[in-house]
Image: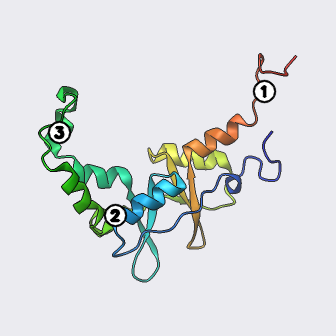
């Protein structure tokens, strides 16, 4: 059963991450997202204020996918010979700064908010994560996967082992 101390609160599923900042390399964003198993980081400006977000999806879309490939995705075969020098392109992108990939900061939520509010806010904003911020201080990120995992800890279903 779930840790009763955290119950259905955000604190029990909060994932602490670094923030992206001006001059940070794409490689470092990829490494931090991989370490934390998230697909976005908040972005701080030169004064340390949260002012945006950097997502893996946006970086890959802008840096790696020409628009024609997106449009022709259903027609692409197993071999993408149309992408010349792909490894060189990857190296180039990883060594760029994230500054050109920053998106507007999406809605945030306070750490004492109920889990269901986080879920509703994610749905309202058509996203699968939300940044947790208290009085301008970034605490971490909550993901839809974290919410689902926490919810599953509360279920005892008919047919479960030991349920007789």
Mark 3 → mark 2, Cα distance in angstroms: 22 Å
**SS for tag 1?**
loop
Which mark is first along the chain, 2 or 3? 2
Residue at image point 21% right, 39% down: 70
**SS for tag 3?**
helix
Viewer-side label of 3, 2 = 2
Which mark is first along the chain, 2 or 1? 2
Is residue 19 toward the left or the right of residue 67 in the image? Answer: right
- Compared with residue 21, is residue 82 higher up or lower down, i.e. above or below? above
- Compared with residue 7, is residue 41 higher up or lower down, i.e. above or below? below
The disc at residue 148 is: none
Q: Tell me the quarter of the picture where residue 43 sits.
A: bottom left
Residue at image point 47% right, 61% down: 32
Disc 2: which residue: 26
Of residues 86 and 129, the one drawn nearer to the viewer in this rendering: 86
| Residues tagged 3 and 1 counted as in contact (Cβ below 8 A) | no
Is residue 104 toward the left or the right of residue 62 in the image? Answer: right
Disc 1: which residue: 156
Residue occupying the far right of the picture: 164
Disc 3: which residue: 69
Quadrant of the rendering where the C terminus is positioned: top right
**SS for tag 2?**
helix
Q: Residues within 10 Å of mark 3 (few under 14, many from 20)?
A: some
Across and down, in percent, residue 13 comes to: 66, 52
Residue occupying the far bottom of the picture: 47
Count of numbered marks: 3
- Compared with residue 110, is residue 129 higher up or lower down, i.e. above or below? above
């Amino acid at each position: 059963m779930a840790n009763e101390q955290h119950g259905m609160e955000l604190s029990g599923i909060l994932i602490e991450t670094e923030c992206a900042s001006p001059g940070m390399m794409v490689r470092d964003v990829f490494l931090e997202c991989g370490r934390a198993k998230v697909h976005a980081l908040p972005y701080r400006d030169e004064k340390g204020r949260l002012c945006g977000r950097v997502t893996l999806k946006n970086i890959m879309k802008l840096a790696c996918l020409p628009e024609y490939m997106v449009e022709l995705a259903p027609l692409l075969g197993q071999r993408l010979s149309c992408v010349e020098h792909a490894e060189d392109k990857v190296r180039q992108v990883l060594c760029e700064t994230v500054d050109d990939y920053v998106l507007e900061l999406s809605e945030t939520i306070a750490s004492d908010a109920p889990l269901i509010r986080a879920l509703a806010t994610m749905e309202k904003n058509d996203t699968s994560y939300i940044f947790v911020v208290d009085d301008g201080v970034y605490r971490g990120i909550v993901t839809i996967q974290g919410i689902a995992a926490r919810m599953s800890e509360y279920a005892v279903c008919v047919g479960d082992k030991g349920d007789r």
